[in-house]
Image (spheres, grey):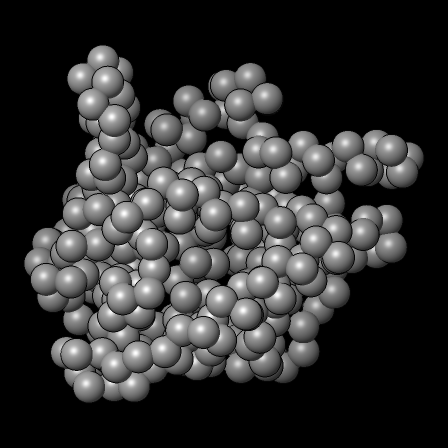
Amino acid sequence: MTEVTDPTDGRFDGLFAPDSLTWRVHADPILWIGGLRALFLQATHPVAVAGVLRHSDFRADPWGRLMRTADYVGTVTYGTRRDVAEVGARVRRLHAAVSGTDPRTGTVYRATDPRLLRWVHCCEVESFAVTYRRAGGALSDAELDGYYDEQRRAAAVVGLDPATVPGSAAELADYFAGMRPELAVDRRTRRIATMILAPPMPAWVRLATPARPAWAASAGLAFGLLPGWARRLYGLPGLPLTDLAVTAGARTLHAALAAAPRRFREGPHLQQAKARLAAAGAG
């Protein structure tokens, strides 16, 4: 695929229309598990890890970093085109100030490097789609390709040429196969994985609420949803039985989240977008 389809139809001032595959997938609350999966997958790239550890505030403020990432994805998905342009410009400015040398490989890196941007993007969208489908979300093979094609518009927001971004499941599979020789898990990767599995929490939260075990179970589920080759990089098996158990866990969680009241299932960006639609008489 060499062109980016425009799923908007004039009814909605945003990058993606309400009837887009992106809205369908990203509106599902199981996507927060997909976001954690993406972090585990992104951390298998040594140069990406070097940049995170040296320039990111992930270790000092993991909750803030996670919330800012969620806000970015929500804005790109549901915000107005002006909102998307502003958040994209802000991210590109931050990336322009980030550069360094990976002490493990000696590789000089820049956050604006299309190879790194493409890695982050592909890990994210593949994790979203795989998590959604494994949890029982309805997405045919053709719709999966359509979702990846739509997401090339999101890749353009951070400065990628959409023509260089995988736009189908087959292209993504080829991309990851080509990247695997560059991937590795070392003590730095495991440090990030530990932060994902057990982020710092106030003492009263750890001791007086079930937040710690609940978070660990959720992060463990996200890890289990990784492809077998990625789990093996981390030194854990990728057995078919494991995949069956993880899929069952994802579907159980998905059913529980679907039963929650809508105000808890829908994030603020989606709620605001629906309000704009209603105000415009399009909802």
The image quadrant where one finds the C terminus is top right
Front one among 233 and 109: 109
**Number of residue marks:** 0
Image coordinates for residue 18, horizontal then vertical, percent: 73, 45
Left or right: 5, with 113 as reference point: right
Whether residue 46 is situated above or below residue 79 in the rendered picture: below
- Residue shown at 67% from the left, 47% from the top: 78
- Residue shown at 24% from the left, 39% from the top: 199
Front one among 48 and 108: 108
Specify whether residue 90 is in view: yes
- Residue shown at 58% from the left, 63% from the top: 90
The image quadrant where one finds the N terminus is bottom right
Specify whether residue 145 is in view: no
Name, please, the residue furthest toward the right.
281
Image coordinates for residue 97, horizontal then vertical, percent: 45, 74
Whether residue 127 is situated above or below residue 215 in the rendered picture: below
Front one among 80 and 31: 80
Image coordinates for residue 216, horizontal then vertical, percent: 22, 34
Whether residue 193 is situated above or below residue 116 in the rendered picture: above
- Residue shown at 33% from the left, 65% from the top: 55
Left or right: 63, with 201 as reference point: right
Image coordinates for residue 230, horizontal then vertical, percent: 22, 62
State which quadrant residue 249 falls in: top left
Left or right: 46, with 132 as reference point: left
Left or right: 80, with 197 as reference point: right
Whether residue 123 is situated above or below residue 199 in the rendered picture: below
